[in-house]
Image: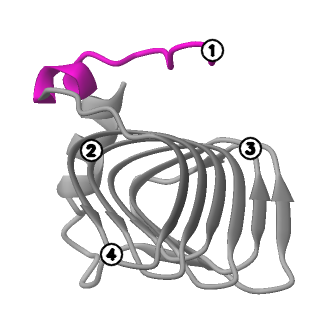
Amino acid sequence: MLTALWKRAETPSEDVAERDISLLARGLTIRGNLDTTGEVHIFGHVAGRINAGRLELGRGGYVEGDIVAKEVLLCGRLKGRVFALNVTIAAGAILEGRVFHHTIIVDKEAQIEGRMPWRPLNFFETLTDLPKET
């Protein structure tokens, strides 16, 4: 599942000159699943699962749920889990949950309550269903 999602995100159509970037502005709330093969920047509130090629949770943004992406930048607040090859947790970010990653960068002054277990590349390539929360 993840491999197919990323392969589609990495092969842009010939008529698209720029990357597909979606923006969820402040004041916008989405409940449910959010799927994109491109990039999404979140400054509002999402309650549910997000599948994306790349995700940026901006300052003031809040996600309650799971994030599945190739690359994730957390600057806002997350209550949930992240499944991503590359994760950056910026200063001022607030994380309550787990981050399953291959590489991670955590800036000073990031607030983290949870675990950040490392996973090999093949974990993400063969991941079809998310593990149950424990």
**Quadrant of the image occupied by residue 100:** top left
**Could you tell me which residue is drawn at 50 percent across and 54 percent down?**
36
Residue 128 vs 56, above or below: the answer is: above
Q: Is residue 126 magenta?
A: yes
Q: Which residue is mark 2?
A: 6
Q: Which residue is mark 1?
A: 134
Structural crowding at the residue carrying mark 4, measured as other residues with C-alpha within 10 Å and reported as few (<14), some (14–19) or many (≥20): few
| Dot 4 amino acid type | Asp
Mark 1 or mark 3, earlier in chain: 3
Can you tell which of label 3 and label 2 is closer to the viewer? 3
Structural crowding at the residue carrying mark 3, measured as other residues with C-alpha within 10 Å and reported as few (<14), some (14–19) or many (≥20): some
Can you tell which of label 2 and label 1 is closer to the viewer? 1
Tell me where residue 18 appears, x and y as whole percent.
Answer: 28, 83
Main secondary structure along the magenta-highlighted residues = loop
Can you tell which of label 4 and label 2 is closer to the viewer? 4
Quarter of the picture containing the N terminus is: top left
Q: Is mark 3 in CB contact (under 8 Å) with mark 4?
A: no
Say whether residue 8 is left or right of residue 33.
Answer: left
Q: CA distance from mark 4 to mark 2?
A: 26 Å
Q: Which residue is mark 3?
A: 48
**Could you tell me which residue is drawn at 26 percent across and 75 percent down?**
15
| Dot 1 amino acid type | Thr
Q: Which residue is mark 4?
A: 107
**Quadrant of the image occupied by residue 24:** bottom right
Quarter of the picture containing the C terminus is: top right
The answer to which of 27 and 78 lies nearer the viewer is 78
